[in-house]
Image (tube, rainbow, N blue to C red):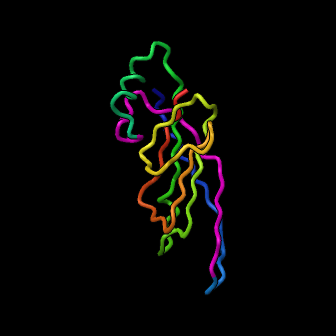
């Protein structure tokens, strides 16, 4: 294992008009990494049961890509998000996805989507892509 840690910070300045409703759209490509060999995938992406056993027993070890959407960092506002929409796009249709985030549905062979009104940010969203 490497004896170093990489931390990346992304920020921008924003100005909002006083006493007016604002629509905010954030689109970005997150930083991608690999889970450490001793990662607790059961806790971080809710990978358990048959899927966890399948991953451990596969003859050809799959490529694991871990993506963490930092939601709580930007949650400094005082109210919920009126309309929240999350789209997770898989690299291929055969890529498997594991995440603890509830409410995701397949909308195409490569896209999962979650839409929620009055969304309260309670945690970051971590996704494991299994290829």
Up the image or down, 21 lies above or below 40; here it is below
Name the foreground residue: 4 vs 99. 99
State the residue at coordinates (66%, 75%): 15
Image quarter for residue 37? top left
Image quarter for residue 107? top right
State the residue at coordinates (59%, 49%): 87
Residue 78 point in image, percent of width and height: 47, 75
State the residue at coordinates (51%, 37%): 66
State the residue at coordinates (41%, 60%): 122
Indicate yes or no whether the magenta region holds residue 105. no
| Quadrant location, the N terminus | top left
Specify the farthest residue to the bottom.
Answer: 19
Q: Is residue 44 left or right of residue 94?
A: left
Indicate yes or no whether the magenta region holds residue 22. yes
Residue 23 point in image, percent of width and height: 65, 71
Q: Is residue 15 left or right of residue 57?
A: right
Numbered range of the magenta stretch: 21-45
């Amino acid at each position: 294992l490497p004896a170093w840690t990489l931390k990346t910070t992304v920020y921008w300045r924003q100005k909002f008009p006083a006493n007016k409703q604002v629509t905010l759209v954030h689109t970005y490509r997150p930083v991608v990494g690999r889970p450490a060999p001793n990662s607790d995938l059961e806790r971080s992406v809710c990978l358990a049961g048959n899927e966890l056993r399948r991953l451990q027993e596969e003859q050809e070890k799959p490529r694991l890509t871990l993506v963490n959407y930092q939601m709580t960092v930007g949650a400094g506002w005082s109210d919920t998000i009126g309309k929240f929409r999350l789209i997770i796009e898989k690299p291929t249709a055969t890529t498997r996805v594991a995440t603890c985030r509830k409410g995701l549905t397949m909308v195409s062979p490569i896209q999962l989507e979650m839409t929620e009104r009055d969304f309260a940010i309670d945690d970051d969203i971590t996704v494991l892509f299994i290829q």
